[in-house]
Image (cartoon, rainbow, N blue to C red):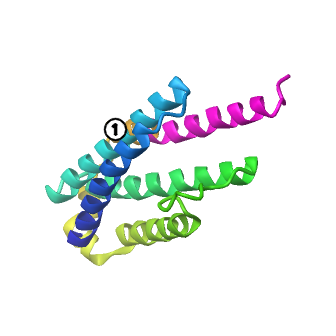
Amino acid sequence: LSFFVFTMFLSLVFNFILAFSEISESTGNLSLDILVILYWIGSIGFGIYTIYCVTTLKKNAVSMAKMWVSLIFLTNIVGVVFSLFTGEPLTTETSFLDSPTWIIRSLVYGVIWFLYFTYSKRVLNTFPIKERRSYTFDKIFFFGVLAIPIAIYFLAYVGITASAGVYE
C-alpha cells in the first residue's frame, strides 16, 4: 500500500507539472480549453482525495483506489478508441508522455493495481470487506472526472469532422 501511495504521489506531482504545460498550450477553442483545465483539476483532486483515504485508512479507501486506477485506465482507453475511430494519431512527434508505449504501460499498471486491490491479502487485512464503504459522492466525483475526457474527445471529433467537411 505504501508503494501505491508513493507512486500515486509521484504521478500527481508529475501530472501537476504536465497540467501547466498542457494548459499553457491553448487549443484556440474555449470549450476545449476549459474542459482541459477542469480535467486536470478534477483528476489531481481525485488523486489527492484517494491518497488521503488510503493513508488515513478510511472505509472508502479501497473503492477510491480502484476508481483511481479505473479512471486512469478508462481515460487512456477513451484516447485509444478516439484515435482508432478518427484515424488521428495518439501523439504528435514532440509528445513523449502520450506515446503508445506510455499508454500501454499505463493500461497494464492499471490492471495490475486493480487486481492488487481486489485480491491482495494485505489489502484484505488492512481493509476488511465488512468494513469497506463506497460513498455516492465518490462515485459522482469519479464519473464527473471521467466524463470530461469523453467530452473533450467528442468535441475534438466534432471539430475534426467539421473541418473535413462532413457537416457541410
Magenta span: helix, strand or loop, mainly? helix
Q: Is residue 33 above or below residue 2?
A: above
Q: Would you identify the image quadrant in which residue 112 lies?
A: bottom left
Q: Residue furthest toward the front?
A: 94
Q: Would you identify the image quadrant in which residue 145 lies?
A: top left
Q: Does 51 appear in magenta? A: no
Q: Quadrant of the N terminus?
A: bottom left
Tell me the residue that label 1 is attached to: 41
* Residue kind at label 1, given as amino acid type: Ile
Q: Does 155 appear in magenta? A: yes
Viewed as shown, does residue 4 lie left or right of 26? Answer: left
**In-front residue for pair 114/132:** 114
Q: Quadrant of the C terminus?
A: top right
Near mark 1 (Cα within 10 A), the count class, few <14, some 14-19 or many ≥20, is some
How far across and how far down the image is residue 161, in percent?
77, 34
**In-front residue for pair 116/147:** 147
Q: Residue at x 48, y 34 (%)?
A: 26
Q: Residue at x 72, y 36 (%)?
A: 160
